Amino acid sequence: MRTPARSPRRLGLFTNLTNPKAVIFYGGIFAAFLTPDLPTWVRLAAIGVIVINSTGWHVAMACLFSTGRARQVYDRLKPWIDRLAGSALAFLGLRLVLHGAMTRTD
């Protein structure tokens, strides 16, 4: 059976594949921890772990949010979740700025 071009599955796949945040996040991890002197199998294993972890997470979220109750709870809590996440990111950003200002040696 063929799915339409605008199916939710296809839209979700394209949304995730074109998300630059994931590329930046994993690129940063790879740059910090996967040095060129590591064996190829370690680098390939890391990619495999990321693919399995990411797939598991997205499948779990799809199953969870396919229930009406979970969507209702999330819709009710979403403003507070957004505020909490935004505050945490602002705090971490401010901490980076302050730490960088304190350790600067011009």
Image (spheres, helix red, strand yellow):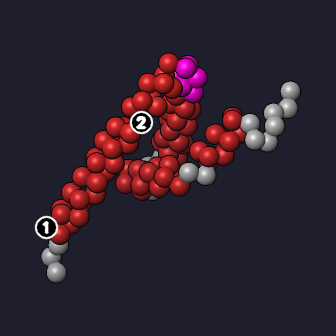
Q: Is residue 64 inside the magenta stretch?
A: yes
96 and 49: which is toward the camera: 96
| Pointer 1 residue | 102
Q: Secondary structure at mark 2?
A: helix
Query: Who comes first in sequence, dot 2 or dot 1?
Result: 2
Q: Amino acid at mark 2?
A: Lys
| Front position among marks 2 and 1 | 2
Residue drawn at point x = 13 percent, y = 67 percent: 102
Q: CA distance from mark 2 to mark 1?
A: 36 Å
Q: Secondary structure at mark 1?
A: helix
In which quadrant is the N terminus drawn?
Answer: top right
Q: Residues within 10 Å of mark 1 (few under 14, many from 20)?
A: few
Residue drawn at point x = 50 percent, y = 38 percent: 50
In which quadrant is the C terminus drawn?
Answer: bottom left
Please report the bounds of the magenta region as a residue range. 62-68
| Pointer 2 residue | 78
Secondary structure mostly taken by the magenta-highlighted segment of the chain: helix
Q: Is residue 61 inside the magenta stretch?
A: no
Q: Is 18 displayed left or right of 92 in the figure?
A: right
On the image, the x and y values in percent for residue 6 come to: 75, 41
Q: Amino acid at mark 1?
A: Met
Above or below, 80 relative to 104: above
On the image, the x and y values in percent for residue 20 come to: 53, 55
- The tag on residue 83 is none
Q: Is 57 displayed left or right of 10 in the figure?
A: left
Residue drawn at point x = 51 percent, y = 26 percent: 71
On the image, the x and y values in percent for residue 59 come to: 57, 27
Pointer 2 with pointer 1, Cβ within 8 A: no
User: Would residue 105 be visible to someone looking at this image?
Assistant: yes
